[in-house]
Amino acid sequence: MKIILTGGTGFIGSRLIELISKIKSYETLIISRKKIKINDKSNIRNFKCDLNSLKKLKNKIKVFNPDVLIHLAWDKIPNFNKTNCKTNEKNSKNLINFIIKNTSTKHIIVSGSCFEIYPPDKSYKYFVESKKNILRFLKIKTKVKKIKYTWLRIFYVYGSNQRKGSIIPYLLNCIKQKKVSNINEPNKRHDFIYIDDVCNAIINTIKHSKKSNIIEIGSGKVSSIKKIAKLIKKISNNKLRYNLNLSSIKNNVFKAKIQKAKKEILWKPKINLENGLKKILRLY
C-alpha cells in the first residue's frame, strides 16, 4: 500500500508517522515544508515541498503513484483569517485535483473539523467556509473519477506536542513553572479525544473503509475545562494550582456521533480522558 501524507510536521501528522511507520506493508511518502527526521525507517520517505509549489514534485509523485492520499495539512494554525483560509482552501483543492489527474489513487482521506457543525464563535467563519468548500470540491471530483473519499470530522484533539496555546499544555506549563493558572472559561465543555485514538481512526479508515463517507472522530463524551484541571491536579499530586472564573457560563453541549465510525471503519476510542492526561504527564 502506497500512501502520500501531507501535514507530517503537524500535531496529528507527526504522531501518525510514528504509528504508520510500524506497518511494514505501508510505504509512505510525506510532503512537507520542512525536512522530517525519519530515523532510518525504510518504509517512510520525505519530499520537502510547499503545497504552493506542488508542480515541482509532479514527476516524483507520478512515479510513486499512491493508492491513498491522507491530507492533514493546514498552514498557520490558529490563524483563521480570510486570507490564510482561502490560501489553504486553494492549496487543498489543487492538491486533490493534482492527485486525481496524475495518479491512480483509489482513496482520499481529508481531515475536517467539528467546527463545521459547531463553530465556537464568528472568528472561525472563514475556516468553516473553506473546509465546507473543500468538501464540496472533493465530492464532485471523486464522483467523476469514481474514487472513494473519507472526510474525518475531528473533534478536540489533545496529546503530547500539542500547540502551547491550548488549555492542557497551558496547565502543564503552569505546573512546570510553578505558577498559578487562571482558567477563564472553566465551564466550557468539549469532546476531547486523545491523539493516538485519532491516528488509529485514520489507520482504520485506510484498512476498513468500503465507501465514501463523512465520519465524526471524537470520544463521544463531553468534559469541562474545570474537569480537566481537577484531573490534572489529581494526577500531578496537587502540583497544579488554579483560579476559576466563577462567572463563566456553560456552552452548548456537542459531542461526536461515533456510531458511524464504529460501523464503517471498525473504530472506537480506547483512551479515556484521565488515562490520556496520565500519558501526557509522564512525558512532560
Image (cartoon, rainbow, N blue to C red):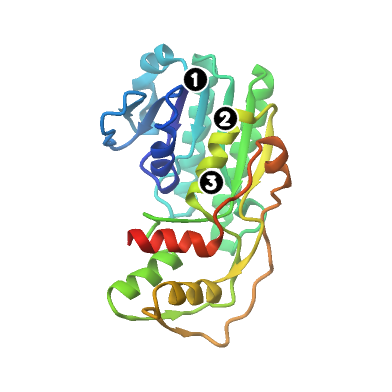
Label placed on residue 198? 3
Q: Amino acid under label 3?
A: Val
Does the CB distance between marks 1 and 2 fall below 8 Å?
Answer: yes
Query: SS for tag 1?
Result: loop
Answer with left or right where residue 105 lies relative to residue 243. Answer: right
Name the one closer to the observer, 42 or 186: 42
Nearest to N terminus: mark 1 or mark 2? 1
Name the residue located 49 percent from the left edge and 79 percent from the top edge.
184
The answer to which image quadrant residue 22 occupies is: top left
Does the CB distance between marks 3 and 1 fall below 8 Å?
Answer: no
Name the residue located 42 percent from the left edge and 52 percent from the top edge.
77
Nearest to N terminus: mark 3 or mark 1? 1
Name the residue located 45 percent from the left edge and 26 percent from the top edge.
4
Q: Amino acid under label 1?
A: Met
Query: SS for tag 2?
Result: helix
The relative height of residue 281 versus residue 188 in the rendered view (above or below) is above
Return the x and y of residue 253 as percentages of the image width and height.
69, 67
Return the x and y of residue 126 as percentages of the image width and height.
55, 52
Q: Amino acid under label 2?
A: Ile
Return the x and y of residue 111 as percentages of the image width and height.
55, 41
Residue occupied by mark 1: 1
The answer to which image quadrant residue 140 occupies is: top right
Residue occupied by mark 2: 206
The relative height of residue 88 versus residue 2 in the rendered view (above or below) is below
The answer to which image quadrant residue 55 occupies is: top left
| Marks 3 and 1, how far apart at CA | 20 Å
Name the residue located 42 percent from the left edge and 58 percent from the top edge.
279
